[in-house]
Image (cartoon, rainbow, N blue to C red):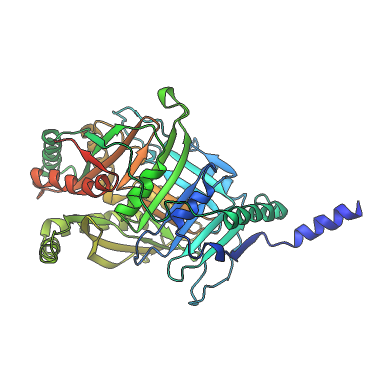
Amino acid sequence: MALASSAHAAADLLPATRLARLPELDQVAPIDAAELLAGSPGLALLESARPGRRSRWTFLTADPVGLLSRPSPGRDPFADARRMLQRLDGHGLERRSPDGLPGPPFLGGLVGFLGYDLGLALEPRAELVPNDQDLPQLRLALHDWVIAWDRRSGQAWLGGRALDGDRRHLGERLAAVHERVARGRPPANRGQAITPERELVFDSSLDRARYEAGVGAIRRAIRDGEIYQANLARRLSTAFDGDPWPLYRALRTGDPALFTAYLDLGPGERGARSGMPRAIASASPESFLSVDVDGRVTTDPIKGTRPRGRTPEEDRALAAELLASAKDRAENVMIVDVLRNDLGRVCRPGSVRVPRLCRLERTSAVQHLVSTVTGRLAAGRDAFDLIAASFPGGSITGAPKIRAMEILETLEPVRRGPYTGTALWLGPDGQLGSSILIRTLVADGAQLSLHVGGGITWRSDPVEEWFETVAKARGPLRSIGGRETAG
């Protein structure tokens, strides 16, 4: 009895939140390190695949200790998520990296996605299109450990948070992860994309004529004063029941982005999809919402797009055209106003600001206008309140948001699913990181899909809007060896 009491007392002395260097992975790319955890359930990689102002950290985790796959009933769809997150220790750490900046902001918590159609729970409206994918409205996994890479220093860290106060179990979990990655060997295909075994040919849910007609319908709604803008999307899909991971490697390598993500969704559960692998593979250039430990909120909406040029001169000309476009600037400013309103619902009065408006940012395939809106959470408000006030993002719905979503429901023949939802991590200390799920492949166990869309305003030309979606699809499809059938 005395020995048991002594062991229990020793366990109580262990920290409930831990962080340690993991030098074994300093020189290993996160995408390769993820393969050291192959076969682990719930593998999640949220990766900064290229340098950027808001893309310092990469997080890898697996083997969750809890899972939610439906919103909570009642007025708060995140009630169960709040309770699950509270099971982890919420203490912060003051550990700093060699450059004097704070260490990893995420040491364990919720990781997953919220689908666009979760908006039906947040803002009820008519649901005219059935769900033809074997995917939930949300999927949030509770993780008690994380491997984090600092893009600035190249250093890797292993951190974790005790579940239900069990500090001994946390130590065992961290030791097991350390042993697995320390003894593992990098894959033979290290740093390389994997070419799919066959060409992937995608069909569109809207052909060119129907998409252009949809643009015309939105312009008429704008003319009649119903809305100012709406984001019309179409889905490209092809039969696919294979392993999604090689597609992520190809997507991430061929179209590197600020906010890439791979989320293992586990096996399919319905019909022909039963037992088939499901996953989200995203190469998004757009963050959604972030919250730091002091409650500071940031969002970076993208509106306005041009393709990259084939020569430096053409590239500069296209950028100048975008920056000078009254239509694209108006589109961006309208969405900034939507987000200012969304943040204003949960932020301190007077704290919402727009420090950057319509700056130019580029990916390998396109260039965008990007703005930044910031705020400070009001007393008694948290990241869940912020998500509820702002979801889905204004940049991929329209203005006014609810009416725009109602009109889109009549024009888009398939549900969006994860597309234009968000991939996120959320810690028990209140910190949040998330991205808008665009440039995103979704494997649902039977099909592989990629949505593309664009913001429609009164000044939109239907033909130009169609070709903008073609340009947006080109990068992701090219990276995986796919192509779209002629529209």
Q: Is residue 274 above or below residue 102?
A: above
Q: Position of residue 111 (x, y in %)?
A: 49, 49
Tally of numbered tags: 0
Which percent across, then down, holds residue 127? 32, 30
Which residue extends farthest top? 271
Q: Nearer the viewer, residue 261 or 72?
A: 261
Front residue (pair 354, 92): 92
Q: Residue at x 53, y 54 (%)?
A: 185
- Along the horizontal axis of the image, is 370 left or right of 389? left
Quadrant of the image occupied by residue 407: top left
**Residue drawn at 16 percent across, 60 percent down:** 329
Residue 223 shows in the view: yes
| Residue situated in front as seen by the camera: 186 or 380 | 186
Q: Which of the 4 image quadrants contains residue 23?
A: bottom right
Res. 399 visible in picture: no
Q: Is residue 36 left or right of residue 447?
A: right
Q: Which percent across, then down, holds residue 262? A: 42, 47
